[in-house]
Image: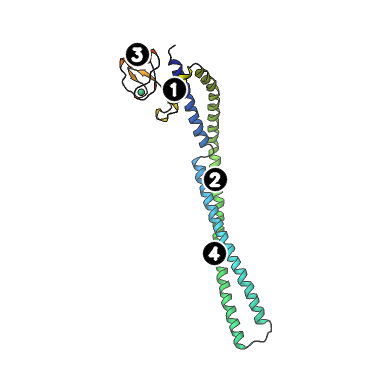
């Protein structure tokens, strides 16, 4: 057996493994992340935030009303409490109370408007929540397919791994070290062995001289251009 044959065998197994791992990673990423679900969840989060803002505004308005009402109760007690006061004082107190009454009426109007807004926001949030449920239900079929594909890939890898270990054990340690170093260098796309096809490197297409082709056939030679191990 040629020196590069076990390296080429290992390369084929590694390519299968890399493809499976890549697909597995993409499946893991896609699981539970159907675009429609992600969009519906974003819309729900926006609705919930809008509802929270309206509720905050309503609470602030109600608090203002309570403060004003308490103040008016105190003013009324003072005005009608039988305490002797000058006509001018009474006039001033009444004017004050009237002004506060108008303020209270404005706050009542504002509270009513915010309550209507709150009802609309609550309805929108409920609708957004239903949309998320619908999208999740629709995505369930897709997720089931993805999970099935994940199972197949995991099972395939379980078969591949011992074969790969076996293939690695067939390669001389120094050759294996070179193989791993070339594979780890991302510029070769994880491919460290190239077949010699028609007097050229099958990896980068560089034409090989007959001396280079002979060296590749006789032992272990690397492509002068891409550095891959040439398998003749
Ligand atoms: Zn090459």
Quarter of the figure with residue 8: top left
Distance, label 2 to label 4, CA atoms, is 29 Å
Q: Residue at x 52, y 22 (%)?
A: 160
Please tell me whether mark 4 sits on a helix, a strand or a loop: helix
Instruction: Name the spot of residue 85 as percent of width and height, x first.
Output: 65, 87
Instruction: Name the spot of residue 227 as percent of width and height, x first.
Output: 38, 24
Q: Is residue 52 visible?
A: yes
Distance, label 3 to label 4, CA atoms, is 89 Å
- Relative to residue 5, is residue 186 depicted above or below? below
Colour scheme used in the picture? rainbow
Q: Kindly indicate whether the residue at mark 4 contacts the one at mark 2 (C-beta within 8 angstroms).
A: no
Task: Give the residue pinned by disc 4.
Answer: 113
Would residue 122 be found to the left or right of residue 14 on screen?
right
Distance, label 1 to label 2, CA atoms, is 52 Å
Q: Is mark 3 within 8 Å of ligand 1?
A: no
Q: Quadrant of ligand 1?
A: top left
Task: Give the residue pinned by disc 1.
Answer: 178
Task: Give the residue pinned by disc 2.
Answer: 132
Please tell me whether mark 2 sits on a helix, a strand or a loop: helix
Mark 4 closeness class: few <14, some 14–19, many ≥20 residues within 10 Å: few
| Marker disc for residue 122 | none
Distance, label 2 to label 3, CA atoms, is 65 Å
- Relative to residue 133, is residue 218 depicted above or below? above
């Amino acid at each position: 057996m040629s020196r590069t044959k076990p390296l080429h065998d290992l390369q084929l197994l590694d390519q299968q493994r890399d493809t499976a791992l890549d697909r597995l990673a993409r499946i893991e990423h896609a699981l539970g992340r159907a675009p429609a679900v992600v969009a519906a969840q974003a819309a729900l989060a926006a609705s919930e935030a809008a509802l929270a803002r309206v509720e905050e505004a309503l609470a602030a308005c109600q608090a203002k009303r309570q403060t004003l009402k308490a103040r008016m109760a105190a003013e009324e007690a003072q005005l009608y409490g039988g305490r002797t006061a000058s006509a001018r004082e009474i006039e001033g107190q009444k004017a004050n109370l009237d002004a506060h009454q108008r303020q209270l009426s404005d706050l009542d109007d504002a509270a009513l408007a915010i309550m209507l807004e709150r009802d609309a926001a609550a309805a929108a949030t409920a609708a957004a929540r239903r949309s998320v449920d619908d999208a999740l239900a629709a995505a369930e079929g897709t997720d089931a397919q993805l999970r099935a594909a994940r199972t197949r890939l995991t099972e395939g890898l379980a078969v591949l791994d011992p074969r790969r270990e076996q293939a690695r054990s067939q390669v001389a340690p120094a050759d294996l070290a070179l193989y791993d170093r070339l594979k780890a260098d991302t510029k070769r796309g994880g491919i460290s062995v190239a077949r010699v096809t028609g007097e050229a490197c099958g990896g980068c297409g560089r034409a090989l001289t007959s001396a280079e082709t002979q060296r590749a056939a006789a032992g272990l030679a690397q492509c002068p251009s891409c550095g891959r191990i040439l398998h003749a």
